[in-house]
Amino acid sequence: MRLRLMMDDDESFLRSGQGLVRILRGYGFADDDALLDVGCGVGRLPIALLATTSFRGHYRGFDVSRRHVRWAKRSLTPIAPDMTFRHLDVRNDRYNPEGAIAAAEARFPARTEGYDVACLFSVFTHMYRGDTQLYLHELHRVLKPGGRVVASWFLYDDATYESAVEGAFPMVHRLDEHTIYHEAEDPLRAIAFHEDEVREMIAAAGLEIERVDYGHWSRDRNGEQFQDHLLLRRPELTTAQRLRRRAGSLKRRVLGRG
């Protein structure tokens, strides 16, 4: 109970996990997908998958909190061997200030091109821009071609800036020309990025935006969810890329025989 960030009771904890499942389902998540849960915490999403769905794919979650990962490994993996958890000791001013790994040097504990779907719920809402850019590049690496990312954000643009300043988390402080945040002494409690900048970061990582669903955290928007959600996609391989991969695989097999 003390590891739950919101101190939810069991019913509320499960209900919030089911909400995450519904969000994923709305973006096409299937029971046999390989799922990477970035910022898994104590396991809210996998507990909901186990309790309320017929999920039969592979799940891996990782988090910067060693205590949360330790609980999930001890409590969930023994009953669901295809659900695995890893600790990534990357520094975050709010959640892991003593982390051994600088965010710019972080590498996800996940195999390259191993996942159909990656999700990040309330992760980019607590990260600086440079760290976010690195995570986007890592998402491109771990996704299969055609794989998808479901991620929540706080987004604003020139037209909605005043709405963000007066929203549920009033983003009254400015970090730079692209970034605003809620609490002066704790910028990563809630941080928002200009949507144009987010779109540029996503494109620079080789990902595409398939869908944007705005939440109701800012004053003038009334989306279904509280945070904004983006559905991203790693593009499928081009014909030339497939041919190069096939040639490389054939060369490795020939050299291996030699």
Image (tube, rainbow, N blue to C red):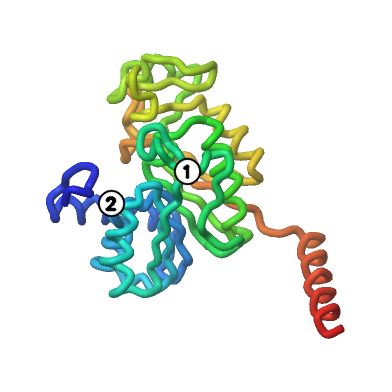
Q: Nearer the viewer, residue 29 or 253?
A: 253
Q: Where does label 2 land, which residue?
A: 19
Q: Is residue 246 left or right of residue 157?
A: right
The label on residue 31 is none
In three-dimensional space, the C-alpha distance between marks 2 and 1, rounded to whole angstroms, equals: 33 Å
Q: Please, what is the three-letter code of the amino acid marked with disc 2?
A: Gly
Crowding around mark 1 (Cα neighbors within 10 Å: few <14, some 14 to 19, many 20+) is: few
Q: Quadrant of the C terminus?
A: bottom right
Residue pictured at 35% horizontal, 28% vertical:
221
For the residue labelled by badge 1, is the local secondary structure a helix, a strand or a loop? loop
Residue pictured at 52% horizontal, 39% vertical:
102
Residue 98 shows in the view? yes
Question: First in sequence: mark 2 or mark 1?
Answer: 2
Crowding around mark 2 (Cα neighbors within 10 Å: few <14, some 14 to 19, many 20+) is: some
The spot of residue 134 in percent (x, y) is: 57, 41
Q: Nearer the viewer, residue 223 or 71?
A: 71
